[in-house]
Amino acid sequence: MIRPQRYFPWKIARKLYFSQLAFVFFALMLTGYSLRYFAYSEFSQGGDVAVHLARLDNYLMSLFFTIMACAALYLLLVARFYAAPLGRLLQKARELRRLDAPIDQYEAEADEGIEEPHEWSDLERALTRIHKDLRGKTDDLFREREELTALIGALSDGILAVDAKENALFYNPQFALMFRVTKMPQRALRLGEMIRVPEVLDGYREVLRTGEMKFITASFNAGETDQARHYSIAIAPLRGKELEKTGGAIAVFHDVTELKASEQIRIEFVANASHELRTPITSIKGYVETVRDDLKNKRFDAIPQFFDIISKNVDRLTFLVNDLLDLSTLESGSELKKAMIATREVTDSALKQLEVKRASRNQELVPHFSAETVMADPARVEQVLINLVSNAIKYIPEGRRVDIFWESAGESTILRVKDNGPGISPEHQHRLFERFYRVDNGRSRDAGGTGLGLAIVKHIMLKHGGQVKLNSRAGEGSEFVCVFP
């Protein structure tokens, strides 16, 4: 073990030593000369020795008190000269501890030169430099802490750190919202009081035990919602002063609910698209084989009927592919060609395309125009109208009515398509705009639907910066509301 080098203030010690030695020397010299002069003056005159000795005692007493008074005054000046800097340094040390010293004033004094003796000035300059460095490091640490606090607070992920005894060290607002934790109480909360998910607790404890990072996934109810959300959780050890020991653990809770939902939608989309494509292709292939056999055996009576079925499935396949292409185009970020269009003109164009379908079901389509114009892409608005009105025609009973309303609401234009059909049950409404979702699969396929119409409407409205919503009750009809900003 290397012993620290000891420093001795030789300059102050030498000055103090020689100043005291000089004072003693001069005091002794003064005493000796004074006694010699007194003895010469007294004994040179002759007389009674007892009288002379009494006078000598009085003189010695006076001389003693005089020397003591001079010594007290001298030592007072010396003590003040050497103790005053110590008081100043003690004050600076206290201010250094509180970090509220007037550092600019001390730096100015250091630059001008401190009028203190020898090592006192060196010590004061050293304290000033230490205080300056410590103030700078404290400011840096405070700034870094504020930056880290702001960064952690801005993260969308929840963060919780605990010590080796599972006491909470800190957490960010997102974690508090996620686990409904109020502000930190007087005592530190325990990990088990904040989190009651077994997988997460086991993950923390394993990291505290092994000191190795761990990744886990867990599902639990978070925040104010009653639905379980999925989290990917990374738990890392916190090292103590001794790096080989684990001083705690910190975890980042990353919400992957939307990611899992997107992945599930993608899987369902691929499965549904494959199924929707396979159904007409299988039908076409089957009837082509049947027609081939009939031609080979010279049976021609049923061939026109088979060709009608094949044509119907080809049309269904074409509609499906076109809808998939439309959906892909909308999702790819293609720009809209917006213009100020007449609502009456675009509505009449859409209704003309649906006239045959409307007439076949003996239904009534009634447009209402409170808003004369709308700023939108004409082709996409017509597509929205065709999809919404076509759905109403397919799903409401024959002889019913569909109303199309164009209305103004401030700076927005609203399209409402309302029918007096059977309505849609609440359990289907939140999924109605998903791809390939059907309230009644069999009925939808029989009616020729692809299951993509409402998904396309939703994407078109989102591309316009608007929204689409459904108002419906079972037995009271349905109303689709599209808002064009």
Image (cartoon, rainbow, N blue to C red):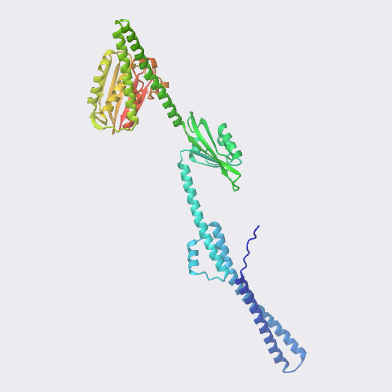
Q: Residue furthest bottom?
A: 45
Residue drawn where x is 56% and y is 61% of the image:
93
Q: Position of residue 398 (x, y in %)?
A: 31, 13
Task: Relative to 83, say whether 422 is above or below.
Answer: above
Q: Position of residue 337 (x, y in %)?
A: 26, 32
458 horizontally vs 155: left or right = left
Exactly how many numbered labels are in the figure? 0
Quadrant of the frame with the N terminus: bottom right
182 horizontally vs 351: left or right = right
In front here: 314 or 333? 314
Q: Position of residue 282 (x, y in %)?
A: 37, 15
Quarter of image, res 43: bottom right
In front here: 433 or 232? 232
Residue drawn where x is 57% and y is 39% of the image:
212
Task: Relative to 18, say whether 249 is above or below.
Answer: above
Q: Position of residue 259 (x, y in %)?
A: 44, 31
In front here: 81 or 323? 323
Task: Relative to 29, say whether 330 is above or below.
Answer: above
Task: Relative to 67, say whether 81 is above or below.
Answer: above
The reply to whether residue 154 is visible in this rendering is yes
Residue drawn where x is 46% and y is 29% of the image:
260
Q: Residue furthest front?
A: 296
In front here: 423 or 158? 158
